[in-house]
Image (spheres, rainbow, N blue to C red):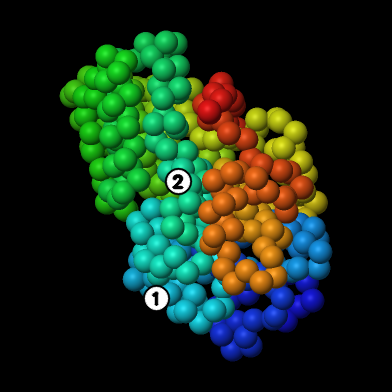
Amino acid sequence: MSANPSLLFPSEIILAGRQSGRLVIGLLVPLSGIMGAIGPSTVNCAQLAAEEASSRGNGRLVDLLLIDAGRTRAEVEREISALVSSGLVDGIVGCHTSDIRASVVRAVNARVPYVFTPPREFERIGSRSSYLLGPAPDCQLAASLRWFHEYQHIRRWALIGSDYVWPRHVHRAARAILGDFGLEVTYERTVRFGDVDAESIIHQMQNTRSQGLIVSLVGRDAVEFHRQFAAHGRASSIPRLCTSFDEDSLLAVGGDSTGALFAAMPSFLTDGDERHQKLLAAYENRFGAFAPSLGAYSESVYDGVHLMSSLRMARNGDQPSLIPLANGMVRRRDDMWQSSPLGAPGRAMTLGQANGTAMNVVQRFALA
């Protein structure tokens, strides 16, 4: 193995064993399946973070063990359980759907820290050994829905999402927020992965006189849905507020110039703030101008690897487990990002509007 940070496959570390003195992070990202399009950029951002953390870690190198989150839940659970049981990983950083998360939690079984990074998932602090970096659905939606209420005067909303845990939570949160504003949910539907029929959804929206649509589809399904929607003529002008849509997704769609495609995410790289400018510069310097494009998902993996690496930097030599240390650090929010040259990620939600292949920032909303 290299004297520098390494990107390894499970077969390599099983055959050769792990090198002493290194932090080995299981990097669980989709290399296939419904969210496979984000795989290349998430792997790149994880490598960038591992190299930065290694250079700041007083000689403590960080290795990444690449695990495909695009497989079935059973396959992922078996592999994670075997790696943790064998002592081959010190922690897991994952960016994937929340149905896979439930399997990972079972496999980890509070034996190593597990950082779940998607920018559109729940924020929980010190839940046994699982740490979720994204906001809760009510935090993600509330300010953006208020903006639509005040500036676009939308009173009748439809909800469409993938049929699994997280979109159902989004729908519950949306119903509560819209109810508080005195607004209506006129149509609601969840669909199985790979079974998105935009024509049918548009027809039902028209029948129910829906004026706006909250979209919680993920990955390839979201891309196909928005392509179909934008090509539909009159329906393409219906405002769509997406809860799982970043710059990578917009590029995969081929851009959108309807003026009706919006997304609520913690941030977009077009924010133009100093943190994002530095991240973009570091990414291009490391991987070149033609590397897979960055997005909110890949940025979240960058932060997740730095959080796990910071645990290692704060660990005393005689501490056998990172979990008590992780719980304390996350509760206090101190030293969580000491391995990162960019420091802590911001605590905000951003409403973006698609403009071709760019996501223009409409407004940023601070989170408490």
Q: Secondary structure at mark 1?
A: helix
Name the amino acid, label 2: Arg
Q: Which mark is residue 149?
A: none
- Name the residue carrying label 1: 78
Instruction: Provide the residue designation for mark 2.
Output: 124
Query: Is 360 situated above or below 125?
Result: above
Give the residue at x 42% y 10%. Answer: 150
Number of marks: 2
Gap in angstroms between the C-alphas marked 2 and 1: 25 Å
Quarter assignment of residue 343: top right
73 lies left or right of 301: left
294 lies left or right of 186 = right
Say what amino acid the circle numbered 1 marks. Arg
Residue 282 placement (x, y as % from top left): 77, 48
Residue 57 coordinates in the image, percent (x, y):
77, 61
In the picture as drawn, the residue positioned furthest to the bottom comes out as 15
Q: What residue is drawn where x is 43% and y is 53%?
A: 127
Is residue 121 left or right of 354 when viewed as pictured?
left
User: Which of 220/203 is in front?
Assistant: 220
- Would you place residue 27 above or below residue 146 in this image? below
Q: Is residue 213 above or below residue 67?
A: above
Where the N terminus falls, by quadrant?
bottom right
Q: Position of residue 337 (x, y in %)?
A: 68, 48
Given the current orientation, which residue lies at the most extreme left position? 207
The crowding category of the residue bearing disc 1, from other C-alpha atoms within 10 Å (few below 14, some 14 to 19, many at least 20), is some
Q: Nearer the viewer, residue 32 or 123?
A: 123
Query: Taking 22 as reference, is 305 above or below it?
Result: above
Q: Secondary structure at mark 2?
A: strand
Q: Residue at x 64, y 81 (%)?
A: 18
Q: Is residue 18 visible?
A: yes
> Where is residue 106, by image quadrant?
bottom left
